[in-house]
Image (cartoon, rainbow, N blue to C red):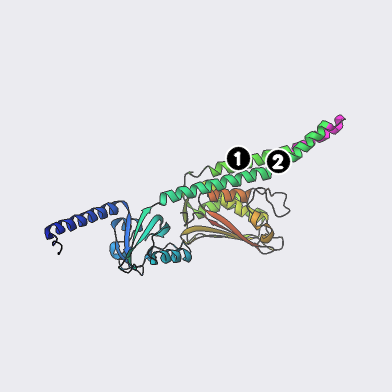
Amino acid sequence: MLDKEPDKGQLFKYLESVFTDLEQQKIALDQSAIVAFTDTKGNITYVNDKFCEISKFSHDELIGQNHRIINSGYHEPEFFTNLWRTIAKGKVWNGDIRNKAKDGSYYWVATTIVPYLDARGKPYQYVSIRFDITKQKKQELELKHRTKQLEDFCFIVSHNLRAPLSNLLLLTSMIEECESFEEQKLLVDRVAKPVNLLNEIFNELIESLQIRQDGEIAREHLFFQDCFDKVVESLNINIIHPDSTIRSNFTKVPTIHYPKKYLLSIMQNLLSNAIRYGSPDRKLKVEVKSYVKNGSIWMEVKDNGIGIDMKANGKKLFGLRKTFHHNHDAKGFGLFITKTQVETMGGSIHAESELGKGSSFYVQFIKNDSI
């Protein structure tokens, strides 16, 4: 006996309700998530408004394009190889991706990619559902940065206070064992040196700590040349090195939005180093310039001084109270405080140097890949 033929009206109503539910789900998804469909080659076939909003691209600019259009270059090629290997097998992929918007800004998205499978179980298209997690990533980065700062500070404190405290304890115990007043007086006089050193270190550490907590310091619209001229005038370079040549070129990036006291301090410390470690065999020559590299503002300070043995001292170059030449004026605080100021404002600093030829310091004021 044949089954009863299904009621076409009921079937139509059922299909209509299914499509209505799907449409409502799509609307809900579009309101809350960043959605895109792609073919098996990774070419975009659909994007919702939220995708356009976060990527800064229009629908027309995205449809037909490969997802490489928003590739930030942050992830290694293996990252995407593993992603494609997973979804090509018909499996769901989950992970966090950093993308690049049309205006050059970066954003993070928590991503789920679901394959659509045909009757043979082979993917014929993919839907990616993303949620903006840029704010969370920034908070994670800030927490990581603060934790690293705390670890560095604890190391600096323990490392730099150990020697003077040990000397002080030794002298104290020796004073207690002295039998004559003359011996005690001699040792008491010797106590002054480690005490003064401790006081210097404490003051330096307090200044460093204040800078580390100064991330919200007011920024100003500054002209590099104005700040540079002010520093050069204060250092009396022409008096110390009358035949010196100090050149600056800030034409590529004439201005910066930065705390004035930090920019002056950074310039002063780097120029002071160039003066202090000038070569006795040739006239002092210093070149300072600003430029843009990978979307970040940089400043380079290059000199022809005595140079630094980077193989022996490169890793401790920016350490507190680290000096590398027999100069009685050097305290090993300038480069340490410069690094602290630069990093507090989200930048970085590194150096290249060769003994007998000179040094170059590179300051990246604001990291382009900060998230």
On residue 206, which mark appears?
Answer: 1
Q: From the image, give the main secondary structure of the stretch colored magenta.
A: helix
Where does the N terminus fall, quadrant-wise? bottom left
Residue nearest the viewer, comparing 145 with 26: 26
Q: Secondary structure at mark 1?
A: helix
Residue labelled with disc 2:
197
Is residue 164 visible in the rendered structure shown here? yes
- Give residue 54's mark: none
Q: Position of residue 273 (x, y in %)?
A: 64, 54
Residue 147 position in % (x across, y down): 54, 46
Question: Callout 2, which amino acid?
Answer: Leu
**Start-end of magenta stretch:** 177-192
Q: Residue at x 32, y 65 (%)?
A: 117
| Residue at x 71%, y 38% (from the top left corner) | 196
Task: Tell me residue 356's x, y (percent).
Answer: 69, 63
Furthest residue in direction right, as rendered: 180
Q: Residue at x 72, y 39 (%)?
A: 165
Amino acid found under the numbered disc labelled 1: Ile
Residue 43 falls left or right of residue 369: left
Label 2 – label 1 distance at C-alpha: 14 Å
Pick whichever, 81 or 253, lies toward us: 81
Q: How packed is label 2: few (under 14 Cα within 10 Å), some, or many (20 or more)?
A: some
Q: Is residue 187 magenta?
A: yes
Q: Between disc 2 and disc 1, whose residue precedes?
A: 2
Q: Is residue 34 magenta?
A: no
Element on which disc 2 rests: helix
| Vertical side of 65 occupied by 346: above or below | above
Number of marks in the image?
2
Where in the figure is residue 66, as x and y percent of width and height? 36, 67
Circle 1 residues within 10 Å: few <14, some 14–19, many ≥20: few
Relative vertical location of residue 357 with respect to residue 139 in this rendering, above or below: below
Image quadrant of residue 19? bottom left
